Image (tube, rainbow, N blue to C red):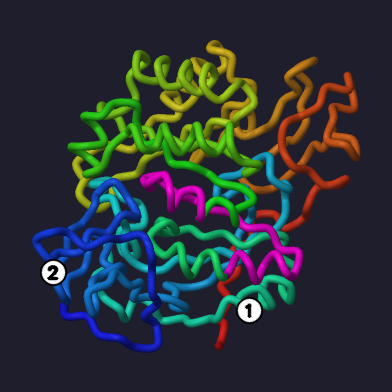
Amino acid sequence: MDLAIDGTTHPTKHWHTLANGRVQCDLCPRFCKLREGQRGLCFVRGRVDNAIVLTTYGRSSGFCIDPIEKKPLNHFYPGTPVLSFGTAGCNLACKFCQNWDISKSREIDTLADQATPQALARAAVAHGCRSVAFTYNDPVIFMEYAIDVARACHQHGIRTVAVTAGEICAEPRQEFFRHIDAANVDLKAFTESFYRKVCGGELQPVLDTLRYLHHETDVWLEITTLLIPGENDSPHELDAMSRWVVDELGPDVPMHFTAFHPDYKMLDHPPTPPETLTRARDIARANGALHAYTGNVHDATGSSTYCAGCGDVLIGRDWYVLGTWNLDQQGACRSCGTQCAGHFDASPGTWGARRQPVRLGL
């Protein structure tokens, strides 16, 4: 598809010209090397007039208000609504993609909704959202739009959330996450072979992103792994992964183990049995993870938050509906006073499990 300058084309800066005349995109470790008019694998970044541009600035595949727990973030203002949106394309090629109709789209018509950063921030305020989430596809590929939205949101006191696979280079990583308040990073597996064969990516840049977020920023971090039967769910791999998280990032970083359902190019794989998720949670807890969760299944035990001190339930969850709330106004256990890692209001939000589509204009 030939590229041309239009109202949704936006300049970028993470690229350089090669000796052979191609222009290399330096946003992610894929380093696409483009001729004039070509797009990168992500589809939304391409070469126009000897520079790399973003072609989907201000355009979205849709806006929706979700519970923050759906991102999933269990320790970032629980129970509050988040205005979620994405664009099109992705810089990975996961065969199991659960949002393939958006992230693998090569159709601009997918981007039916439009909103300026200020309009999006005002909509979040008008609908009572505590935060805005860049999700559905990976926000690193539309980082210029996401950063401008984040700036507008912060002017209105709205937090920002990135749901990302973490495949991004060091310099743009610093620039992007400077504007983010919370992130859920999709740690897809713990082997390079899985990343190469199933995702078309690399594990090491993701681990670098995780280390960077936890040790060099104030971004609240949680991690999600979609467990696919026979692919990334062995006890050995889950043991290695959870040990790495606890050793490298610390025991307070929440880990979410979620259920796969057959989709996209992995329709031949069965859904994840609930017992696989429970086993993963048990392995992580045995390795020192203080907050390990199950997801995409009905499991009140596996989705609730427990005190690291006395073991009492701090936040009871039934799907996305909150029940028990045993945190004081400082986010500490009312039973023993142990602080729970995260960001909490004095009382829980009441958004529940609602999912509310929103249409925005310019």
- The verdict on residue 160 being magenta is yes
Closer to the camera, 205 or 279?
205
Query: Tag 2's secondary structure?
Result: loop
Kindly identify the amino acid type of the residue bearing the numbered disc 2: Arg
Quadrant where the image shows the C terminus = bottom right
Q: Which quadrant would residue 20 be assigned to in this image?
A: bottom left
* Residue furthest to the top: 286
Q: Position of residue 119 (x, y in %)?
A: 62, 81
Residue that carries the numbered disc 2 in the rendered image = 35
Would residue 334 be found to the left or right of residue 191 on screen? right
Which is in the foreground here, disc 2 or disc 1?
2
Decide if residue 195 is on the left or right side of residue 327: left
Circle 1 sits on which residue?
118
User: Which residue is located at x 73 percent, y 35 percent?
Assistant: 316
Q: Are marks 2 and 1 in contact (CB under 8 Å)?
A: no
Q: Which mark is residue 224?
A: none
Find residue 351 and report its image quarter: bottom right
State how far apart marks 2 and 1 are (Cα).
Answer: 34 Å
Give the magenta part as a residue range. 149-175
Mark positioned earlier in the residue sequence (2 or 1): 2
| 304 vs 33, nearest the viewer | 33
In the image, is residue 271 above or below residue 80?
above
Query: Is residue 283 shown left or right of residue 127?
Result: left
Callout 1: SS: helix
177 relative to 60, above or below: above
Is 349 within the magenta?
no
211, 345: nearer the viewer: 211
| Nearer to me, 54 or 61 | 54
Query: What x and y, as percent, mark residue 21?
Result: 12, 66
Dot 1 alpha-carbon crowd within 10 angstroms: few under 14, some 14 to 19, many 20 or more: some
Which of the image's four quarters has the N terminus? Answer: bottom left
Residue at image location 69% in from the left, 77% down from the top: 122
